[in-house]
């Protein structure tokens, strides 16, 4: 372990690469999240109806229908075959996320992401215990459960409680008491389970993860030889298990982060001072030697450049 | 592990089975909670009326993705999406409250056209065929027409006037020499738009209300024969039972058919 582990997360990256470089994907993500929300709010707030609807289903420029494919799937298993408009919309969304990474939805579009990111940030600041950490496959169980309940009840079951639609629809059409779901997710992530909701339970994320299993856009640890073990990427990554196989791989292992759980948020790229990570595509086979390091030697105080 | 002879693969299998059981049990508990919430969401309040062409409520909840496009294309801001804990309808689903803003029954039915999933049935092309609910003159004690006055507002505003609502004339027993023009709804023509409920002049609640079919309508008694509609006899041979006359003695089984009463009532119109 290097002594940089004692620095606050991301500090070294700021010092070495500058503040912008150490925050650019975070800022870009916040801009993206704001952008997609604003598109929906232009209508109700300013009367500019470029986009009507919400994340469950929308119509852009009165021509492009978009539908949440997870909701469409629930509708079909519940026994309703949607009209062509909704099916086309689900297909467009499905293909787009299958290409750029299913969970790009989670980190670049979903309005709950800033909520759970805030909970995670505060969790780190307050140095709270990890709390309940469900198994990695739990969200797949949740996904299966939602589909089973949809079949049994003949309804789009998850929309009864989905905090994403609650918040998004609430902001656009009227909140009611939907904010309680948002507070609930925040407190759950802060006090009960670190990264609990988006990282372990949310069936929407599970669905989009499956959707993007073979997606093109990927993060690579192609510069992994320069890793100084500061652990900052693990600290900021909402799905930290995805990093290990790529970052700690041998020469023969791919440096690509191929796990479908990776949300392509790019935060690891931000906080890495030695610039180990970068965005690439899944067919990138640039050779990336593993670190020269013997496992038997814990190597105290090495790896810190300068 | 206490068993020293446990093989690694046995441990792995045991662990896998344990994890699977735990995951399944956890999801079963969460799933039961979700089922309970879903059942709760089905309880559509009486006063929440679905848009024209809405599928029956159970099918509607399988089809409506709660996108709000019908709300956006409603030119009269009739439709709203239900807000959690404020409106009783399933969260995020479209409905309207007739007393606030009724359906104006647009000819082109933009809400149905906007629906991407068919939760609002695209086969509905004539708004007069819509069956959002049925109006019921629910408070006949306060309805001004029922009292013998001539309010007539619900009748006048009805988009299917003289078909969905008619004024049925009857004798005003109170005054003895006036008529009562009773607003009368005919469910086969009523679209449930709620314009009558909206326009009722009573100060707070309306005397005529749009109610869901499940509340307002009974099933026809098909096991009863309507003699005035068909003349075929009930059984092959005609059974002529003795007629009973009104007045004292109709329950006199010793002399069926009654008898002339000892005293005469003032004649009612001379007949009989």
Image: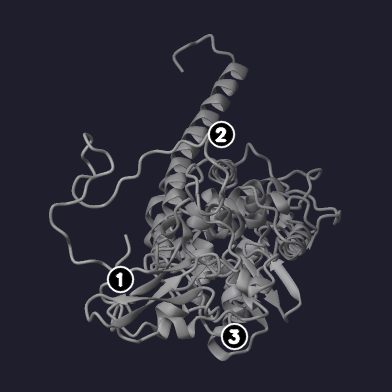
- The residue tagged 2 is B236
Asked if residue A239 can be seen in this view, the reply is no
Query: Which residue is labeled 3 in the image?
Result: A42
Q: Residue A232: x and y, percent?
A: 56, 59
Q: Assess disc 1: are there few (<14), some (14-19) or many (≥20) residues with their C-alpha within 10 Å of its C-alpha.
A: few
> Toward which corner of the image does residue B20 lie, by quadrant?
top right
Q: Residues within 10 Å of mark 3 (few under 14, many from 20)?
A: some
The Cα atoms of the two marked residues, 3 and 1, are separated by 45 Å
Please determine whether, in this image, residue A65 is positioned above or below residue A104: below
Q: Is residue B235 above or below residue A259?
A: above
Q: Earlier in the sequence, mark 2 or mark 1?
A: 1
**Depth check: A195 or B172 in front?**
B172
On the image, which quarter does residue B127 sit in?
bottom right
Given the image, what chain letter belongs to the residue carrying mark 3? A
Q: Which residue is mark 1?
A: B139
Q: Position of residue A261 (x, y in %)?
A: 65, 51
The image quadrant that residue A215 belongs to is: bottom right
Which quadrant is the C terminus of chain B positioned in?
bottom left
On the picture, is B182 further left or further right than A120? Answer: left
SS assignment at label 2: loop
Residue at mark 1: chain: B
């Amino acid at each position: 372990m290097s002594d940089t582990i004692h620095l606050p997360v991301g500090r070294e990256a700021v010092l070495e690469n500058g503040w912008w470089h150490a925050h650019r994907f975070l800022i870009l993500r916040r801009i993206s999240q704001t952008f997609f929300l604003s598109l929906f709010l232009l209508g109700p707030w300013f009367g500019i109806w470029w986009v009507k609807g919400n994340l469950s289903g929308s119509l852009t420029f009165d021509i492009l229908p978009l539908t949440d494919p997870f909701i469409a799937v629930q509708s079909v298993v519940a026994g309703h075959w949607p009209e062509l408009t909704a099916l086309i919309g689900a297909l467009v969304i499905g293909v787009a996320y299958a290409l750029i990474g299913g969970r790009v939805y989670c980190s670049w579009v979903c309005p709950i992401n800033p909520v759970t990111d805030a909970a995670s940030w505060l969790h780190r600041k307050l140095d709270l215990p990890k709390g309940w950490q469900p198994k990695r496959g739990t969200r797949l169980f949740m996904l299966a459960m939602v589909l089973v309940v949809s079949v049994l009840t003949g309804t789009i079951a998850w929309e009864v409680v989905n905090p994403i639609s609650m918040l998004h629809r609430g902001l656009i059409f009227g909140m009611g008491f939907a904010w309680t779901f948002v507070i609930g997710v925040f407190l759950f992530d802060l006090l009960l389970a670190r990264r609990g909701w988006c990282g372990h339970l949310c069936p929407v994320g599970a669905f989009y993860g499956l959707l993007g299993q073979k997606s093109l856009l990927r993060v690579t640890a192609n510069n992994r030889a320069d890793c100084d073990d500061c652990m900052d990427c693990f600290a900021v990554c909402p799905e930290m298990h995805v990093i290990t196989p790529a970052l700690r791989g041998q020469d023969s292992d791919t440096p690509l982060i191929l796990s479908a759980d990776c949300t392509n948020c790019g935060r690891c790229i931000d906080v890495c001072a030695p610039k180990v990570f970068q965005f690439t595509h899944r067919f990138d086979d640039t050779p990336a030697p593993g670190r020269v390091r013997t496992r038997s030697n814990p190597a105290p105080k090495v790896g810190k450049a300068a | 592990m206490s068993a020293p002879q446990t093989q690694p693969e046995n441990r792995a299998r045991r662990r896998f089975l344990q994890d699977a059981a735990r995951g399944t049990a956890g999801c079963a508990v969460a799933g039961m909670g979700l089922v309970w919430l879903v059942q709760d969401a089905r309880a559509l309040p009486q006063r929440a009326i679905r848009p024209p062409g809405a599928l029956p409520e159970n099918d509607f909840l399988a089809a409506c993705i709660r996108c709000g496009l019908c709300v956006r294309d409603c030119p009269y801001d009739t439709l709203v999406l239900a807000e959690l804990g404020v409106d009783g309808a399933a969260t995020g689903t479209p409905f309207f409250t007739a007393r606030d803003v009724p359906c104006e029954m647009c000819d082109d039915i933009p809400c149905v056209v906007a629906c991407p999933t068919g939760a609002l049935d695209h086969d509905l092309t004539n708004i007069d065929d819509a069956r959002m609910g049925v109006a019921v003159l629910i408070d006949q004690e306060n309805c001004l027409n029922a009292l013998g006055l001539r309010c007539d507002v619900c009748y006048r505003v009805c988009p299917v006037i003289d078909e969905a609502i008619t004024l049925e004339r009857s004798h005003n027993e109170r005054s003895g020499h006036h008529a009562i023009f009773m607003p009368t709804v005919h469910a086969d023509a009523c679209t449930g738009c709620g314009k009558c409920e909206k326009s009722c002049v009573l100060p707070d609640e309306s005397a005529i209300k749009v109610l869901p079919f499940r509340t307002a309508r009974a099933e026809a008694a098909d096991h009863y024969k309507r003699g005035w509609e068909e003349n075929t006899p009930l059984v092959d041979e005609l059974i002529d039972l003795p007629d009973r006359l009104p007045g004292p003695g109709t329950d006199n089984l010793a002399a069926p058919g009654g008898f002339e009463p000892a005293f005469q009532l003032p004649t009612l119109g001379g007949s009989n």
